[in-house]
Image (cartoon, coloured by chain):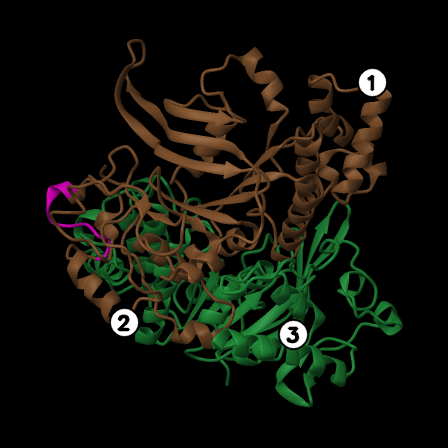
Amino acid sequence: MTVAAEATKAPQKEYGDELLVVDDLVKHFPVTRGIIFQKQIAAVKAVDGVSFTVREGETLGVVGESGCGKSTMARCIVRLLDPTGGKVTFHGRDITRLSRTEMRPIRREMMMVFQDPFASLNARKRVGFIVAEPLEVHGLGTAAEIKRRVQELLEIVGLNPEHYNRFPHEFSGGQRQRIGIARALAVNPKLVVCDEPVSALDVSVQAQILNLLKDLQRDFGLTYVFIAHDLNVVRHISDRVMVMYLGKAVEVGEKEQLYVEPKHPYTGALLSAVPIANPDLGRVRKQIVLEGDVPSPINPPTACHFHPRCPRFVKGKCDVDDPELIHRGGGKGHLAACHYPLERWPMTEAEIRQGHHGAVDGGPDGRAPDPERATADPATG
Amino acid sequence: MALLEVQDLKTYFRTDDGIVKAVDGVNFSVEKGKTLGIVGESGCGKSVTCLSIMGLNPKKTSIISGQALYQGEDLLTMPPGRLRQVRGNNIAMIFQDPMTSLNPVYTIGKQLVEAVLLHNDDVTSKQAKARAIESIKAVGIPRAEQRIDDYPHQFSGGMRQRVMIAMALINNPDLLIADEPTTALDVTTQAQILKLMNDLQERFGSAIIMITHDLGVVAETADDVVVMYAGKIQEAAGVDDLFHEPMHPYTWGLLGSLPKIDEDVERLTQIPGQPPSLLNPPVGCRFNPRCSYAMDICITDEPTLDGVRGENAHRTRCWLDQATKDREAAKFAAERMAEAV
């Protein structure tokens, strides 16, 4: 790629300094046996060494299938879970090992919006109380000031401020998600971690919430880490995108790079699996249908976690040598963890077919005859 | 004759707050070997429509009227004994959630064999087991002979959905009703399941009713599409017509609010407001409170589902004049063309 072409690939938006730096984040959940003398017999490697940076004012989208560790990662960033290893630096300060009291002032700066608007609001509290709670916890203002601020917040997220005294059950799913967003914004955070904020919503309401999140970012200079499994949604909202698979980041890049020119075969498979709302395109589209299921994170495949399902799998390399997340062609800042990155996108018919013969010799679920790969099956693993 | 012909189907539920008109006069037909997509948001009555056809709504609280003719026989007035024969044998259903629709305390083999024995008097249990094994092989579950003795919890989500499909197809039904079969699944698994359903349809020639909220899934699987909103059909068309020439403001809104994977827009077109309560649906056109084209007549009188330019293949329920509709539809045609390049 020429220098000029690379320059056009650079983001148009100007970003500030690094706000959040995550370095080799690891979260393992112990699997124990025994009732009194609990013995750890294994670990669920939910997040297994993820590193990335988020700059002020940008949106980092995180995509991946269920069980890839994206939600666990989000919870580790805001310290709702304690990471097993690695380092989370927020505003230049290492927050990985801070105590609860030390964390408290920092929590004002990083808030979270949860997936399920039905479960994440206390059904016994009035909306006014729910939105006011972060303000009270942090002691921001008198009762009258807090009330005024809450009404202002409700208005910002497009709710009627007079609904201050209603209970969550009186609102629809989209409105509840707006309440969740108002609560997150109450203390003027810098970073908002959104964990699948629109997956529970209908398309027409989903569009409302996505537009609202974009407006709020523009008006308040927010930084988002936006987690979703829907690639279309992530493309719409993000500036940069990270793709996760089995606890690892397999590809990171500006969204244009990643969606137009994916390098990792898994990203390619994800992109090609999304149904397109255009019958003409759907019919001619060449789909990489991945065989089998995501393996268990208790006993992930050796080296590259994706190798048992990968259409570009090369024996003796991918199952032995763990690929690093480095620049593998394409634009600046576009990283992929793959020994044999895609050369072109979309892949040619021949490449897809060749892949299927090369990699999947063990039946339709990707289960190979050799025992090493058999452990990848969640039912037996 | 169409395989299934639904005429003026109405399903009302009695609740403490009044009568919920979940489905309010729905007409459609399904041809042999074709796929009909029913799209709409939650609460629009798409699932209830199919549950009514299958006679699976709670008897005590539901009031059902209209006709659902399966090869000329009305499913709604059929005696329970005959309905049991048809259900699971001629018409089968796949439910949304494969985690909860399989019985956790029986092996999948037992559940599959039950479906065979129930509908075939002349089959021995040995033959039934052989058929069960064959059917789960057909849906791509490896080591079928061993896996048949496994319990549902030993399968992953995608595999469980395959078991559901195997169970639905085991008696070679003419009509398969799939209620959001891939909503609970990840995209890569969804692609597998949709491909599988497509292959099986080609092999066995079953007709499919595909209920979904995902316009992408509809575009890829359906031959004809019905768009439902608040218990009524708002637009019905062939899949190409619907995506190239949508004629109803609600369909425009749905298509516009979809973030697209291959293009960038700063803001999505949003449909303002929320879907209405069916206890008390809006007077006139049910979409009028959220419609940016609403006119005076929309608030007072309800439009009928009429053919576009007199053609019955594409019907829409809207008062707008044809010129405006054409102008809006042209935007979508242009969009599709742009995507194709």
Q: Nearer the viewer, residue A341 or B112?
A: A341
The colour with which the image depicts chain B is green
Q: Is residue A368 magenta-colored? A: yes
| Residue highlighted by disc 1 | A142
Whole-number angstrom distance, CA of label 1 to CA of label 2: 66 Å
The label number, if any, that marks residue A349 in the structure image: 2
Looking at the image, residue B206 lies above or below residue B46: below
Q: Residue at x 48, y 33 (%)?
A: A74
Q: Which chain is assigned brown? A: A
Asked if residue B27 is among those painted magenta in the image, a careful observer would answer: no
The residue under label 3 is B235
> Which chain hosts label 2?
A
On the question of residue A111 being in view, the answer is yes
Q: Do the residues indicated by labels 2 and 3 lie within the same chain of the protein? A: no
In this orientation, which residue lies closer to the viewer: B55 or A295? Answer: A295
Q: Secondary structure at mark 1?
A: loop
Question: Is there a contact, CB below 8 Å, between mark 2 and mark 3?
Answer: no
Q: Answer with the quarter of the image where residue B259 lies.
A: bottom right
Could you tell whether B270 is left or right of B68 in the image? right
**Does residue B89 lie above or below A99 as drawn?**
below
Tell me which segment is drawn in magenta. A364-372
Return the x and y of residue A227 as percentages of the image width and height. 50, 42
Q: Label 1: chain?
A: A
Identify residue type, mark 1.
Thr
How far across and down, in percent of the image, does residue B255 sit? 61, 67
Eyeballing the image, is B78 above or below A139?
Answer: below
Numbered disc 3: secondary structure = strand
Instruction: Judge if badges 1 and 2 mark residues of a common chain.
Output: yes
